[in-house]
Amino acid sequence: MGGLSRGLSLVTGGTVAPYQAAVVRIGTSLTWLLFLLREWPHRQKLYGPDGPWSWDLAHRLVSDNHAFTMLLWGRADAWFEIVYAGAIVASAMLLLGWRTRTASLLFMIGVLSLQNRSVFVGDGGDNVIHLMAIYLVFARCGQVWSLDARRRARGRDGDGAGIALWIVLGLALAVAQLLGRMGLTWTEGLLPWLGWTPFLWGFLLLQAVWWAVRRYAPGEPRTVLDILGNILHAAALLVIVVEVCLIYSTAGWYKVQGSRWQDGTALYYPLHLDDFTPWPGLSHAMATSGLIVMVITYGTVIVQVAFPFTLINRRVKNVLLALMMVEHASIAVVLGLPFFSLAMIAADAVFLPTGFLRWAGDRLGRLVRRGGGAGGPGGPQDSRPWDAEHPGDVEAAEAAEDARARGVVGPRRPGPAGEPAPSNLVV
């Protein structure tokens, strides 16, 4: 009962794993932003009117599967350009953490609009981005490493821009519904029995209620809503964790059933395909070594099947997590699938240790300050290894440190320079 009580206190008393949520936010939005920018010259063929997957074919598919895409609201080229440019802007907003709550909703709309317009575009990483875009809407992913956190840390928690953005969104939603655009495509998987229209109106309503409670009822009503927000955030992160485990479990167990994976030769064949050999010399050199092919083939299966079971042991989990990230980085270089690899690394980041993320954030902050010519705090003590702060039982020490940082257990220790004060405000 004591452990359960402490767990409930951690979930309800503060934002759990704020650094992990921030890394998933940054990685997912950066991957999608880079993809959209790289494909800018080819956007018309991928998602626009010039694509082989025509507007009529897309409309027929959406009529059957009820997926959401704003691109089927009109055939005009100007409308496509607006949606594509809007997806780029939303990705940049989420990456920087500016008005994160609004940005996460716009990011989800942009991802769904483009991906559901042409469902055959992608390399597997698009499915991961698709899922993460939905989950991030429910997560408080801007508590750290964001412009919102920086603004709060400086005591400027004004909500004028946020109110303006939500008013614009409400007006756009009302216009779309009045024009009859919503009924065609707003019933994708998340709420199939209600559709996306009630979901978005409910989202806007909840945001208005939250703002009113913050402004006019800062006592118990705000505490209750804050607890509910913390629970929803924790649930979103739990879903991300389960999703990543399912991805690796299904991939690993399906590989086990394949004869080429069983005899250790599966890697050999993609290394000879022109579509997956951006560096032919490197690919052919690897393919000529039977030992390398066998080790990588069997190692991939072992790591993917074993990873979900290693979550009960922190050190083993960290080792396999590092191996999987190295594997994805190798896939990006050897097989020429950079956006798939970036999407998977961003999803894997939910398992990174808090101590390591804080250490990496401190080092990056010091490099940025030095590069900008501005001296800042961060003396010799900041150069300690990332796990030096947690002697003995490292996992328990990390949990206690996170709890103190959120004000749940004991006094708050001063954070490193640039780290925002704990805040549970929804932006």
Image (tube, grey):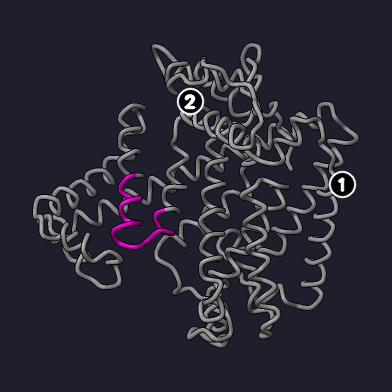
335 vs 54, nearest the viewer:
335
Residue drawn at x 31%, y 55% is 331
Q: Three-letter amino acid code at disc 2?
A: Gly
Q: Main secondary structure of the magenta part?
A: helix
Q: Position of residue 144 (x, y in %)?
A: 63, 35
Q: Three-letter amino acid code at disc 1?
A: Gly
Residue drawn at x 16%, y 59% is 285
Q: Residue furthest right?
A: 216
Is 340 magenta? The answer is yes
Residue ID for mark 2: 355
CA separation, marks 2 and 1?
35 Å
Q: Position of residue 86 (x, y in %)?
A: 68, 65
Q: Position of residue 281 (x, y in %)?
A: 21, 63
With 404 as the anchor, is 223 left or right in this view?
right
Magenta segment boundaries in residue numbering: 326-341
43 vs 73, nearest the viewer:
43
